[in-house]
Image: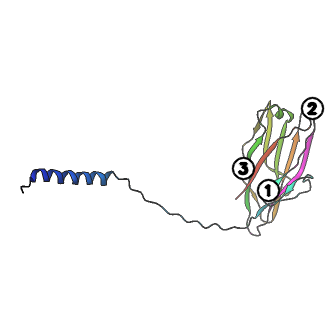
Amino acid sequence: MNINYKKSLKLVTLLITSLLIATVSATVYYSLTMQSTVTVSSTYVKFINATDTPAGSTVDYSFCTLSLSTLPNSTIIYERAVGVNNTDETNGHYIRLRHVSVAPNGTATVGNFTHIKFYLLDSSNATVATLNYTTNGNNWSVTSDTDWVLLQNLTAMYIKVETLSPATATASNAVTITISVDAQ
């Protein structure tokens, strides 16, 4: 049997080239592994009932729902609608008021309100931060989130709420404002 070395060499070269191309063009995958341990810890900054928490409101440590009212052509003030209490015995914690959502927006219902203001009051009732919701026609406008304020250890601050509606406000219209009280 006569072997054609030229053809064999070409075939071997073709096979080696094919293997190299397949090896080089193959996608290489690798992975990084992360493992997390999540531990439930104690919350030091908590909501508490206050002297002006409205009837029908729900105040839990980390969530509260306030049932607020407004009247046509009237300002209603809830001087201490809810408290924010730091139960940490040794450390102060920074808190701020942050806008999350307001609904409805962009509808005629908005015209039933003039403003709703949230004031963060220190233990001496001095205003240390304000988050304002005001209306312009059918739209709500909100100020920027408040700056961080130090809530001293074993101290409470209070959120004051002020509502104002125009004389043309119609009963039963409502707005839902969601605010976050962020704590560090």
Q: Judging from the image, what secondary structure is the residue with disc 1 in?
A: loop
Q: Position of residue 102 (x, y in %)?
A: 77, 42
Pointer 1 or 2: first along the chain? 1
Q: Judging from the image, what secondary structure is the residue with disc 3 in?
A: loop
Q: What label sits on residue 167 in the rendered view?
A: 2
Residue 121 lies in the magenta stretch? no
Range of the magenta residues?
A: 66-90
Residue 63: image quadrant is: bottom right
Q: Which residue is mark 3?
A: 147
Q: Nearer the viewer, mark 1 or mark 2?
A: 1
Q: Are marks 1 and 3 in contact (CB under 8 Å)?
A: no
Residue found at x 74% / y 41%: 143
Q: Amino acid at mark 2?
A: Ala
- The outermost residue toward the front is 1
Residue found at x 77% / y 47%: 178
Q: Nearer the viewer, residue 129 or 60?
A: 60
Q: Amino acid at mark 3?
A: Asp
Q: Position of residue 168 (x, y in %)?
A: 91, 30
Q: Position of residue 12 (x, y in %)?
A: 18, 54
Q: Nearer the viewer, residue 50 or 121?
A: 50
Which quadrant would the C terminus be assigned to in this image? bottom right
Q: Residues within 10 Å of mark 2 (few under 14, many from 20)?
A: few
Pointer 2 or 3: first along the chain? 3
Q: Position of residue 15 (x, y in %)?
A: 22, 53
Residue found at x 85% / y 35%: 114
Give the left or right position of residue 150, taking residue 71 as reference: left
Q: Which residue is mark 1?
A: 63
Q: Are marks 2 and 3 in contact (CB under 8 Å)?
A: no
Which quadrant would the N terminus be assigned to in this image? bottom left
